[in-house]
Each structure stands twice: as structure tokens, then as C-alpha cells.
Amino acid sequence: MDAEIAILRLLHIVPGVIWVGSALFLAWVLQPALKKTGPPHAGALMANMVGPMTKLLHTSAVLTIVFGVLMAFRVRDPLFDYLWSTGWGTMIWLGFLLAVVGYGVGTYGGLTGKKMMAIGKSLQSPPSAEQAVEMGALQNRGMLLAKIASILVTVAVVCMALANHI
Amino acid sequence: MGTAIYLAVLLEPRVRATSNDLERQLLNKTSKLNSLWITSAAVVTMVTGFALISTTQGRRFSDLGTGGWGTMILVGLIASVAAFLVSGMAGAFTAKLRRGLESGEATEEQLASYRRGLTILGYTNAVLVVVAVSTMATARYA
């Protein structure tokens, strides 16, 4: 067994699957359900979840990207020659780009959610019409960003998975 | 796999830490969609996995269980089928919990027992899918 490659693959693929699966579930199942549930329950749950969820998503995303880059350098040498001149290289850099952009969009979506929670926490009484509109707009933006991020990282996985066959 | 881990490690413990009312509402809104989501993903993964084995050059179903590659793929296959069954059992526990919360007829002990069952099944499912993905991902190098 080529232990180094096997370990790099594990450290790339396992966090990658966790990242993409969690992003899809969050964007397409959990957030819409919480929106339907509405306050005060949804806010209470998200306040409880946002810390561990952020840790899980950031850790899995960073591990996926870092070990993916290390593996790319290990399997093709010199990597940069392959990246620009082969089908494999095109799919790999495209997947990398989509993953990084997806991570950025997801992070921005998370920050939007945190902003909305901060407004919710600062409220001493039910929100005014203006605050409710602002919170609604932030929630919609956060949900849209989460959906975009989940699509980007899914396409990144597709590119990476097909790279060897292009 | 991501959904299984997200559910077992993040979502379910935190939903239970809030209130019965939220748990009931969330189960009503997500449990059927969750089952559909997880079952479809699992079925697509397994069916395409079989298709991949049959179309991979130099590999056959008769290789399963023999040699490094065959052993890893077989272990992954068994783990994924087991995870699928465990996930089905978790779905049954979720339905019992949802009905119990909705009707208000289930005792606190019954609800606690459904939640305990769900926690154990959720973590078992998460471990099994990690084993399945890990063995499949490294099979080529075994």
C-alpha cells in the first residue's frame, strides 16, 4: 500500500464529504425548515448551534482544501505543468477554484446569519416593523448564500471526481 | 455521510436541548424530507458504486473479498449497507418520537427511550458511513 497517498486521500475525502453533505443539508433542508418554524424556537436553536456548526464546517473545509493541495503536489510532479496543459489539470484547478469560492460564499453567508442573530439578541421586546424587515432580509440573504455555496462545492466535487477520466 | 454526521453530532443533541415543542415542530417539518434525502443519496451512491465496479477495467464482482482492493471494497460495501439499515431503523424511531410528541400520549420515559435509541443509531450510522467512505477511498492503494 502507498501509505502516504492513502492517508492524504483519507484526510482529503472524509472531511470533504462531511463538508459538502453538511452544506447541502443545511442549505436545502434545515434552513428552510427553520424559516417555516419561525421565532422564537428557530432563533433559540440556531443560537445553540451556530458555534459547533461553524467549527465543523470550517474545520472540514480547511482540511479538505489543504490536504487536497498537498495531494495534488504529491500525485503530479511538477504539478503546475500538468495543471495548465492536461484535462486532469483543468478539472483540478477548476474544482479547487469552485471549492475556495464556495467556502468564501458560505463563510459570508455564515456572517450574515451571525449579524441577524446579533440583532435578535439585542432585542428586549418583539422587533419593530423595521427590525423585522431587516432580519427577514438578512435571513433570506443567508439562505441564498448557503444555497449558492452548496452548489459551488458540489460542482467542485464533480470536477475532482471526474478529473482522472477527462 | 455529511448529513448523517451533521444530524448525529450537531443537530439532534441541540434540538433535544431546547424544548419538546421545537422538537415536535422541527420533526414535523424535516423528518420526511430527511428520510427522503438520506435514502435517495444512499441508494444513488450504492447503485452507482455497483455500476462503477462493473465498468472499472480489470475489476469484477468476483474480486470482492480477495486481494487488497477487493477486501477494502467489500468492507466498504458491508459498512454502507449496514449504515443504510441503521438509518432505516433511525427513521422508524424518529417516526415514533414524532407521533409521541404530537399525540401527547407518550410518557416521558417512552420519549426518553426513543431519543436514546435515536442517539445510538445516529452515531452508529455516522461511524459506519465514515468506515465505508474511508475503505472505498483507499481501496486503490491497498
Image (spheres, coloured by chain):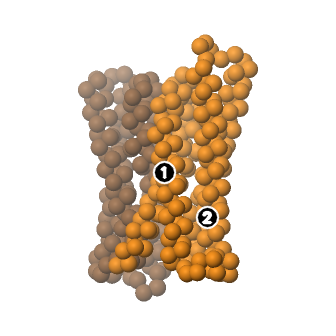
Color of chain B here?
A: brown
Q: Residue at x 57, y 68 (%)?
A: A160
Q: Quadrant of the N terminus of chain B?
A: bottom left
At 49% from the left edge and 41% from the top edge, which residue is drawn? A53
Alpha carbon of mark 1 to alpha carbon of mark 2: how far? 17 Å
Of all residues shown, which one is farthest toward the top?
A125
Asked whether the viewer can see residue A72, the reply is yes
Residue at coordinates 60% horizontally, 20% vertically from top-left? A122
- From what the image shows, is residue B28 above or below residue A160? above
Give the residue at mark 1.
Answer: A59
Tell me the kind of residue under disc 2. Answer: Phe
B81 vs B21: above or below: below
Res. A96 mark: 2
Return the x and y of residue B137 as percentages of the image width and height.
42, 69
Disc 1: host chain = A
- Horizontal arrangement in the rendering, residue B14 relative to residue B119 (left or right): right
**Chain holding disc 2:** A
> What's the residue type where badge 1 is placed?
Thr
Image coordinates for residue B114, horizontal then vertical, percent: 30, 35
Q: Residue at x 61, y 35 (%)?
A: A113
Q: Are discs 1 and 2 both within one chain?
A: yes
Give the chain coloured orange.
Answer: A
B130 is higher (above) or lower (below) than B58: above
Q: Position of residue B39 (x, y in %)?
A: 45, 53
Q: Position of residue A31 (x, y in %)?
A: 57, 38
Tell me the element at label 1: helix
Q: Callout 1: few (<14), some (14-19), or many (20+) C-alpha neighbours within 10 Å?
A: few
